[in-house]
Image: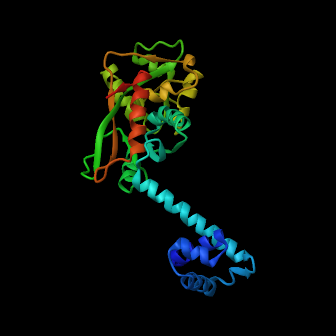
Amino acid sequence: MINPQWIRSFGVLAELGSFTRAADQLGVTQAAVSQHIRQLEQRLGLLLIRRSRGIELTPAGRALLDYGTEIDQADRRLRARLDGADAKGGEVGIITPGSLGLLLYPLLLDLQEADRGLVIRHRFAPDHEVLDAILKTRFELGIVTLKPDDPRITASPFTREPLELVVPAGEEVKHWSDLERLGFIDHPDGQAMAIRLLSLRFPRNPGVRSLPIRGFTNQVGLILAPVARGFGFTVIPRYARLAFAQPDAIRVVDGEHPIVDTLWLIHRAEWPLSAHAEHVVARLRGLIAGDGGALL
């Protein structure tokens, strides 16, 4: 690795064009600056040509100058990330389940548009991947559907999300036979969600697995597309339904026995959130509450 002080001396010399002025600005002797340049040229080749009116950088010298600029920029980014003092500037990484992510991602973009210093990095993932990403510090913030019991994780209630029975617009569901007629649009969590909700709505039903399957997709944003076309019904979390672009083509069947899950905001317990992460969390809580979400 090249000595950072040598690179610093070269950068100041390139800027001022004089060994004497460079030494004065750096607070060292002219001989020290010359020694730094010799050390660099022994490693990298000829970096500058001395002229009567100053110096001229060689291609290798210009490359080293660019390298020094990149180091300075990386150093500033590191200091800003470690400091985290700017609430409206910096990178915020958040990883969430698919349903809530459909709601949050446009809100995150709104925040980034309002505060251009923010850099939003978002990923959709199931609970186990969210927890792993937080533990390995790949993301600063995570949201999960089950509260972790790991002492390295701090968890706080973020919002509540009901499961919903969703059918094509105009359809009625009063009996189990209506579900059998419609058929089920399945997804990776579909069977588990349907068992939880339908076992309460229809307590003596023959079982979700007895229903005909009319379709399947693993993309949370597309689950309601076949429902909107009349191919069947499904059971999904509310935020996935709210994000669907054709609300007039579907209908939620209300029931007496709601299933409501608490969603948990998690982060590492050993250190506090950065100022910009706290800013994003506060804004998201307000936006969800203002949009009719069940904020905790």
Q: Nearer the viewer, residue 43 or 251?
A: 43
**Number of numbered labels in the structure image:** 0
Relative to 50, does residue 157 appear above or below in the rendering?
above
Relative to 182, does residue 12 appear above or below in the rendering?
below
Quadrant of the snapshot with the C terminus: top left
Q: Residue at x 54, y 64 (%)?
A: 72
Colour scheme in use: rainbow
Q: Residue at x 44, y 54 (%)?
A: 81
User: In the figure, is residue 117 to the left or right of 274?
Assistant: right
Question: From this viewpoint, is residue 247 visible?
Answer: yes
Relative to 7, does residue 94 appear above or below in the rendering?
above
Relative to 174, does residue 227 appear above or below in the rendering?
below
Q: Residue at x 50, y 74 (%)?
A: 27
Q: How far from the left and from the top, in percent, is residue 234?
A: 47, 27
Question: From this viewpoint, is residue 237 visible?
Answer: no
Q: How far from the left and from the top, in percent, is residue 155?
A: 29, 42
Q: Nearer the viewer, residue 272 or 166?
A: 272
Give the farthest residue toward the right: 52
Q: How far from the left and from the top, in percent, is residue 196?
A: 33, 29
Q: How far from the left and from the top, in percent, is residue 46?
A: 69, 83
Q: Nearer the viewer, residue 236 or 155?
A: 155
Q: Nearer the viewer, residue 133 or 230?
A: 133
Q: Residue at x 53, y 27 (%)?
A: 224
Quadrant of residue 206 within the rendered picture: top left
User: In the figure, is residue 222 to the left or right of 51?
Assistant: left
Quadrant of residue 193 within the rendered picture: top left
